Image (cartoon, coloured by chain):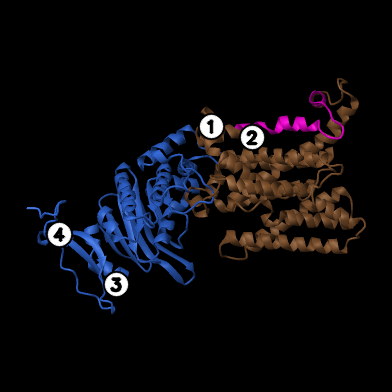
Chain colours: A blue, B brown
Amino acid sequence: MAINPLLRADSITYAYMPGQPVLHDVSLAVPPNSAVYLLGHNGCGKTTLLEILSGIRQPQGGTVQIGGVDISRYPANKRAQRLGLVPQIHMPVFAYTVREVVVMGRTPHLSFLGTPGRHDYEIVDAAIEQVGLAALRDRSYTEISGGERQLTLIARGLAQQTDVLLLDEPTAHLDPANQHRVLETVSALTEQNVAFVISSHNPNSALLYADQVVVMKAGRIVADGPPDRVLTEEVLSASYDMPIEVIYSGRTARAILPRRTNGNGVHVAPLESFDEAAIPPAPDREGRAAS
Amino acid sequence: MIRTLNRRLPGVWATAERRQSALYWLIMLLPLPLAIYTIGLGRYAIPTEDVVRALVDYVTAGENTSTQPDLAYNIVTRIRLPRIAAALVIGANLAVTGTAFQGIFRNPLVDSNILGVTSGAGFGAALALLLLRSSFEVQLFAFVFGLVAVMLSYFTSRLYHTAPLLVLTLVGILVGSFFSSLTSLLKYVADPLDTLPAITYWLMGGLTDVTRGDIPALAIISLGGMAFLWGVRWRLNVLSMGDNEALALGLNPTRLKLMIIVCSTLMTAMAVSVGGVIGWVGLVIPHAARTLVGPDHQRLIPSTMALGAVFLLLIDTMSRTLLPAEVPLGVFTGVVGVPLLLVILRVNKTGWR
């Protein structure tokens, strides 16, 4: 890659139990101003990898560097000034307001006994504005929708003012409209000097929004590159261990679907490649066929 | 009803934030005037101006300058002041440690006894009452066994590698029950004519026997601990989101939680060794404060201190003035605290989900 990577991981290995590694020799590089999508089946090690990249979990082998510095050499708060982890949404025990949750992102910038001041709240309000939640600022985090909660956590990551934000399945539990809203917001933010690593179970999100796609299988990276090269039937079918179909419009991939079975476990033949010209024009509101 | 009230009250009451801010300052201003007023209450009633004069003399001159009767001066400074100071400090102490524990355990149903400090202290006190009978040793044993119980909980839980917080809670409950059983055993073998009533009475809590000599140690440990918890009030917010998030936000949650547990345990053990087992304060007051000022620990920590102090002051005043014989404090906190908690849980919309 021509640009120096902002975040890079070299030969990461990790095992929760000795002898049963969940990550084998994983290396990846995240360029600045980009959105890297991490795909892979359940239990393939995505969350573990994100935790290691964020520095909250120490790998047993290999290194993670940000801007050329090994993150294990940073004290916790300095590391958290450069790397942010946005967790999956959850219910906190106490009903903090959106603003109270977002201002927690300022923690790495505060001294041990410090509390956030006016300057911090300016950054927080700007972050809330960026994700479009200004109207909900004083609402309780427990009362808003799942999509809004995810955006709140992303705003907290922005308020942390890191170089890289790692998002752990930000679209899990969200309806399609909210998935779109969250990922669209993230895409727009890559132009503001933040790089994202996003784990996802939806290859279509990667198709729409990724600058780079990394596909994992059983703790190893099986493909890494731009979406049009990685999101192919061969790579995806091998990674998920089932036939996956990529539907093209012309030369552009438009949708990724699992191939259906006929009910007896036999996969039906692939759909013909999507040919827009062959589709009859949709009828207009009155039901007349368009001319 | 609250909604109608909100609509009718303009200005300071208009938004949740302003309402919480107004209530916060109100709560913070409550303890001092209330303390001065309640010093005058009791079998020998003293007018508030005499109380103030006595206090001013006590602080400035160290003796009565005779603008009020000597008897009033002596009652205020020798009898009621230590007791009321103890009520304020112990109330604040138990309430704020309860808040801190609810924050780090991420559980609104725990208080500072979750690791067994009170049960351990109760056992220590019972043991001292059975064997030694001097009030200094009762306090010392209570304090030491309170710490022993928590250390036992903490280090035992480290033997298990799964779900540290859950294991710690569980082991804490077990250790607490263990010490309660040992206390029962001591009560069973105690002389039913004098030792058993002494143990039973001690376990119900009370500030009757508090003297001026008890105050310095209580004050130093409690105020020091409160200063520390006030200092980390912001970090309690972050800790209450869970270890992984705290780590990702640049904290060291294990170390910080241990510091808070050590600090809270010293404070609770101190409070129990002076005032006996006083339940409910650490559970009711954090909820009450959360309902009034919101869950943000920046406000919650100071306001639980103030509210805890006021609560125990009122309970203690009731226990020494309402009936001809004093009602044990631990009994009264339950009798008043439980209905109060039920009301709070009914009204509460914002404190916790």
Q: Position of residue B99 (x, y in %)?
A: 63, 46
Task: Choose the circle earlier in sequence order: 4 or 3.
Answer: 3
The label number, if any, that marks residue A207 in the structure image? none
User: Which residue is disc 1 drawn over?
Assistant: B13
Residue drawn at (25%, 57%), measured in percent from left and top? A207
The label number, if any, that marks residue B27 in the structure image? 2
Q: Amino acid at mark 3?
A: Met
* Secondary structure under the numbered disc 4 in the rendered image: loop
CB under 8 Å between discs 4 and 3:
no
Q: Quadrant of residue A232?
A: bottom left
User: Which residue is disc 3 drawn over?
Assistant: A242
Residue B259 visible within the image: no
Residue drawn at (62%, 52%), measured in percent from left and top? B258
Task: Choose the circle earlier in sequence order: 1 or 2.
Answer: 1
* Secondary structure under the numbered disc 2 in the rendered image: helix
Look at the magenta stretch and give its main secondary structure.
helix
Q: Which residues are magenta?
A: B25-54
Residue drawn at (88%, 57%), measured in percent from left and top? B196
Residue B51 included in the magenta stretch of the image: yes
Q: Identify the image quadrant of the N terminus of chain A.
A: bottom left
* Secondary structure under the numbered disc 3 in the rendered image: loop
Q: Position of residue A231 (x, y in %)?
A: 25, 62
Q: Amino acid at mark 2?
A: Ile
Marks 3 and 2, how far apart in space?
63 Å
